[in-house]
Image (tube, rainbow, N blue to C red):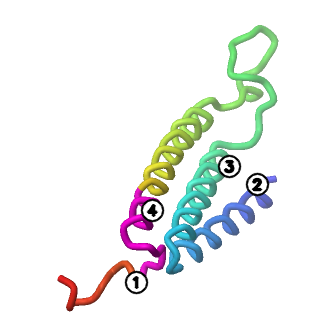
């Protein structure tokens, strides 16, 4: 299962880098979202996919059967942070589109004549 997750993580990172390097501001925002999803899966996979029992102390369950709660807590925190960053990027992109009338990064940077 870890091999499949590694391939999915690699695909998400590849697609995210491709989108981040594009000229459209919306594609860059989607790329950062994909990058954060890849990071979430990476944390979950590196934490280990084993463990059938919840991380609650109970009788009759050995220590090796517990699921590790730390990666789950890290992912929950990362999801909240990535949601906030994506929301901020969307607001900034909307405001830039209102002011400039385009989402093309080449047209947004301007020239030396318009300083």
Secondary structure mainly formed by the magenta segment: helix
Which label's residue is closer to the chain start, 3 or 4? 3
Closest to the camera, between mark 4 and mark 2, is 4
Q: Relative to 90, is 55 on the left or the right?
A: right
Give the magenta part as a residue range: 92-105
Residue 104 x %, y %: 47, 79
Q: State yes or no: residue 95 in magenta.
A: yes
Residue bearing mark 1: 107
Residue bearing mark 2: 2
Question: Disc 4 to disc 1, how far (Cα)?
Answer: 14 Å
Marks 3 and 2: CB-CB under 8 Å?
A: yes
Which label's residue is closer to the chain start, 3 or 1? 3
Residue bearing mark 4: 93
Q: Is mark 4 on a helix, strand or loop?
A: helix
Which label's residue is closer to the chain start, 2 or 1? 2
Which label's residue is closer to the chain start, 4 or 1? 4
Residue bearing mark 3: 45
Which label's residue is closer to the chain start, 3 or 2? 2
Question: Disc 3 to disc 4, how far (Cα)?
Answer: 33 Å
Residue 42 x %, y %: 62, 53
């Amino acid at each position: 299962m870890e091999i499949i997750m590694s391939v999915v993580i690699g695909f998400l990172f590849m697609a995210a880098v491709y989108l981040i390097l594009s000229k459209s501001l919306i594609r860059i925002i989607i790329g950062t979202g994909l990058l954060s999803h890849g990071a979430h899966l990476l944390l979950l996979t590196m934490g280990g996919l084993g463990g059938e029992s919840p991380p609650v102390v109970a009788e009759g369950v050995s220590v090796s059967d517990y699921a590790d709660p730390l990666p789950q807590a890290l992912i929950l925190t990362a999801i909240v942070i990535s949601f906030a960053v994506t929301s901020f990027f969307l607001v900034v992109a909307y405001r830039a589109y209102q002011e400039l009338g385009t989402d093309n990064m080449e047209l947004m940077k301007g020239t030396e004549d318009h300083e």
